Image (cartoon, grey):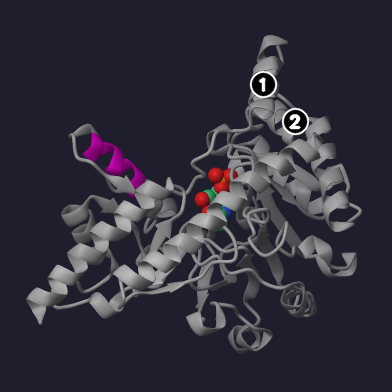
Amino acid sequence: MQGSENVRGIEGSATLAIAALCRELRAQGREVIDLGVGEPDFRTPDFISAAGIASIEQGFTQYTPVPGIPALRAAIASRMKNDHGHLATADGVVVSTGAKQALFNACFVLFGPGDRVLLPVPYWTSYPALIKLARAETVFLSTNPENQFKISVDDLQRSHNSSVRGLIINSPSNPSGTVYTRDELEAIARWAHANGVWLIADEIYGRICFSAERAPSLLDLDDALLERVVVIDGASKAFAMTGWRIGYSYSRKDVAREIASLQSQITSNAASASQYAALAGYQDDSRAKGSIKAMVTIFQQRRDKMLARLATDLPKAAPVSPDGAFYIFMRVDAYYDDKLTDSGAFCSWMLDQTGVALIPGSAFGDDRFVRISLAAPNAALAEAVKRMGEALSKRVAVNA
Ligand code: PLP
């Protein structure tokens, strides 16, 4: 079908497409190790689920205010104060149907035709589509793995012109696990502020950080630098609540009002039971922190073991060690040949030969790489590396 101009060039999410393919292959009886997954392989903590169930039993099943129930907005604001010392007010918080909707809302409200939005590569797969839906144009900023894919103020300055209206930063990053330091964030925020550029900071993995309890945040900076900043976060990753669909944006009040107006015409409010469930997570910080810590410790152990296994079994690959999120972005172009010419071909071949599903780096803007998810049990991760190593060494031997 030929869709309207609005959706021309918008493709479905590559990561969700791989998830669907894995389900299909399994339904056909194939044994698949799905390392494409973008969600924690942990249950939502029981106290959070129980709060959602209780809200249904108590009859809280109607529409809620568009930007979220007041208690949840207040709990999120108070979490920001506790974590970052930022004097957040609840009216800057708009709760949405996942961080993805919060990102859509922010892009649609802030950007429009003629605007350019700077986006460091590799990027989370949905940003270019969200920018395009707002009819703005993405300006891709190249980075390099030696510098953990970070962009600097010089890079930003080089790409700046009068039509640049936005910049999206994702720290910790999906797919690379890059975590910006506070000083680096501050330099970027100062540049954006000085140049009148809106900065969208996607901090959805902020609590999944290996070197600290949480990654540095834009909210750690002075209020004066936050005037043109929208922080995106949510419950999906930290509380293992992907299916509940709770995300939020935090911004200046007038921006939050615009975002809520837009949302009022699209989805109205996030699901009420999900809001009550997330409320328990934001209010009971010590229990939430306990669950997060247990999950992050396991991700970290998996990361360390995976890096060691990959070094042995895939000697020509170059994985980048992540400091946050739960993915390993790995350079594999040393294995490319006349048939395996890009990351898509590499992943299709790998799935076909070994049953291991990975996400091609092309989905994140860098075709030399693939993304491996750590959201799978250790035994599955070990088996996946073994199979990949065997298949690749056979191929290399045949080609030699
Ligand atoms: N931002 C990033 C960087 C992500 O990786 C994801 C999900 O994978 C999202 C936003 C969307 O999160 P949600 O599931 O809350 O919509």
Tell me the element at label 1: helix
The image quadrant of residue 77 is top right
Residue labelled with disc 1: 50
In contact (CB < 8 Å): disc 1 and disc 2: yes
Mark before the other along the chain sequence, 1 or 2 = 1
Residue 13 visible in the shown view: no
Give the position of the N terminus as an image quadrant: top left
Give the extent of the magenta segment.
18-26
Give the position of the C terminus as an image quadrant: bottom left
Q: Position of residue 352 (x, y in %)?
A: 17, 53
Taking 328 as reference, is 71 above or below it?
above
At label 1, the amino acid type is Ala
Secondary structure, magenta segment, majority class: helix
The image quadrant of residue 388 is bottom left
Horizontal arrangement in the rendering, residue 18 relative to residue 211 (left or right): left
Looking at the image, which residue is at 58% across and 40% down?
Answer: 240
Taking 116 as reference, is 77 above or below it?
above
Q: Nearer the viewer, residue 70 or 105?
A: 70
Tell me the element at label 2: helix
Q: Position of residue 320 (x, y in %)?
A: 47, 73
Horizontal arrangement in the rendering, residue 393 relative to residue 293 (left or right): left
Looking at the image, which residue is at 67% across and 62% down?
Answer: 200
Circle 2 Cα neighbour tier, 10 Å, few/some/many (<14 / 14–19 / ≥20): many
Residue labelled with disc 2: 280
The image quadrant of residue 315 is bottom left
Horizontal arrangement in the rendering, residue 268 relative to residue 353 (left or right): right
Taking 170 as reference, is 373 above or below it?
above
